[in-house]
Amino acid sequence: MHQRHISYKFLHIIPSYSVQNAQTSTTWKKNMLALRGLAYLLLLQALGEGITHGLALPFPGPVVGLVLLLIALRWAWVREPVAATAELLLAHLSLLFVPVGVGVITHLHLVSQYGLQLLAVIVMSTWVGLAVTALVLRSLLGKGDAHG
């Protein structure tokens, strides 16, 4: 009987199904989902910019994009990728402060010159933002109590 010699050199290209490959696959799927969510966010911002410029609206395009995002979040095929993108961005939020810190250090002379005015504006705008948020929340909760 003649024995055939079988070469197994090609087996290195066949992935083995181990726990590590399953975790890598899961991570890859999450990253692809987050990338799709980022594409949705950029698309909605671009649509907002286009609508604003096309209709000559007096407010920024990203605001229109956020309204479009609010509407689009009703669908799970948009909501899930955008949630994955939000999780990814929040996990790396501290990196987003690096350009701001570099900008402050670069213009330190302006901070020293206008520091008190900047501090006053930051404190006042924070208080105004908190007050408006509290008033909106109070009015929304008041409407809910009247019906419930």
Image (cartoon, rainbow, N blue to C red):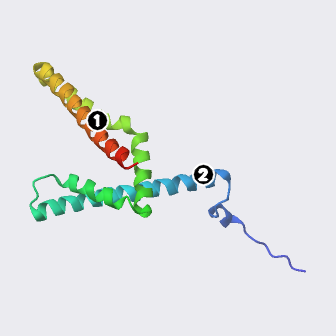
Q: Is residue 57 visible?
A: yes
Element assignment for label 2: helix
Q: Marks 1 and 2: CB-CB under 8 Å? A: no
- Front residue (pair 13, 109): 109
Identified at 29% across, 57% down, the residue is 42
- Amino acid at circle 2: Gln
Q: Which residue in the structure is indicated by mark 2?
A: 23
Identified at 9% across, 54% down, the residue is 58
Q: Residue furthest bottom?
A: 1
Q: Which residue in the structure is indicated by mark 1?
A: 134
The numbered mark, 1 or 2, whose residue comes first in the sequence reads: 2
Percent position of residue 147, x then y: 37, 50
Q: Nearer the viewer, mark 1 or mark 2?
A: 1
Name above or below for residue 111 compared with residue 59.
Answer: above
Q: Which mark is residue 83?
A: none
Q: Alpha-carbon neighbours of circle 1 within 10 Å: few (<14), some, or many (≥20)?
A: few
- Front residue (pair 148, 48): 148
Name above or below for residue 138 compared with residue 22.
Answer: above
Q: CA distance from mark 1 to mark 2?
A: 44 Å
Identified at 20% across, 32% down, the residue is 128
Percent position of residue 43, x then y: 29, 61
Query: Could you say which quadrant of the image residue 104 lies in?
Result: top left
Query: Could you say which quadrant of the image residue 61 lies in?
Result: bottom left
Q: Residue furthest right?
A: 1
Element assignment for label 1: helix
